[in-house]
Image: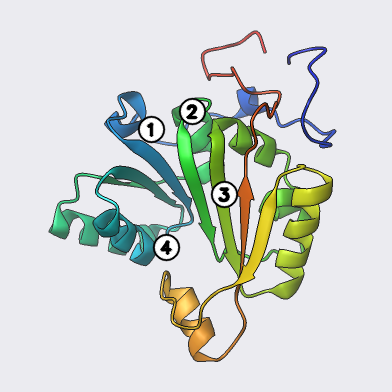
Amino acid sequence: MTDNLELSHQQERAFQPQRLSAPRDFVMPDAALKPKSSLVLEIGAGKGKHALSFAIQNPDKHLIAIERTRNKFEAFEKLVAQQNFANLTAIHADAIAWIVHAIAPNSIDSIYILYPNPEQHNPNQQWLNMPFFEFLLSRLQVGGEIILATNIETYVDNAEHQANKVWCLPNTRSQVESSSQRTHFEVKYLARQETCWELSMKKPEGYQTRFDKWMIADVSI
């Protein structure tokens, strides 16, 4: 791990990427190896509702959408194959291990985490509570954005607190428009007239993490 680095955040416990093995049948996608357009990442793509609409609406960007659950991924993959998207890569893997092995530092334009498992009984597994979030920030370009959406008020409350106090990120919290239909969960929650929140976090100029130059082949960190 890099010594004497003035970090831009207050997270003391360091993530240890060198301990993670590559996912089974891991193959580096061309989009990550030789990006021809802006790279966008979606963690927890489900059956791909947001990913598919994003790819259609943003032909100048390439979305890498990761889903861990097999049945959801298979439904998603089938839709991608039917429409033959050139700017969408569907990945079946655990997102943390896959990102560690596939994504280069400072390479992602934006990251979507839409309606993650709230982990109400295990808050250490909420995204902004995990040391991995520092690694995720190292993959984000300066000025890049992480967009988190949830229908759980305590989740967004904690995420906003962590963004401010731990990760020291400029952020904006807002309510999701009632007409929004990005994911199946979002459609369901809004149809029940539940309030959904979005937290947008930006990576500022000069932001430093322990992993800004870390790649999986680097065993010296």
What's the mark number on residue 146?
3
Residue at 67% over, 64% down? 173
Q: Check disc 1 and report the residue beneath it.
A: 26
Q: Label 1 to label 4, Cα distance in Å? A: 20 Å
Mark closer to the observer (2, 3): 3
What secondary structure is found at the residue carrying circle 3?
A: strand
Would you place residue 153 above or below residue 50 in this image?
Answer: below
Q: Is residue 74 left or right of residue 95?
A: left
Q: Which amino acid type corresponds to the residue marked 3 in the rendered image?
A: Ile
What secondary structure is found at the residue carrying circle 4?
A: loop
What secondary structure is found at the residue carrying circle 2?
A: helix
Q: Label 2 to label 3, Cα distance in Å? A: 20 Å
What's the mark number on residue 152?
none
Mark closer to the observer (1, 4): 4
Q: Label 2 to label 1, Cα distance in Å? A: 9 Å
Q: Check disc 4 and report the residue beneath it.
A: 46
Where is residue 196? Give x, y as percent: 60, 76
- The answer to which of 196 and 78 lies nearer the viewer is 196
Q: Label 2 to label 4, Cα distance in Å? A: 21 Å
Q: Label 4 to label 3, Cα distance in Å? A: 18 Å
- The answer to which of 84 and 36 lies nearer the viewer is 36
- The answer to which of 213 and 208 lies nearer the viewer is 208
**Nearer-N-terminus badge (2/1):** 1
Q: Is residue 25 left or right of residue 79?
A: right
> Mark 2 near mark 1, Cβ–Cβ under 8 Å?
yes
What secondary structure is found at the residue carrying circle 1?
A: loop
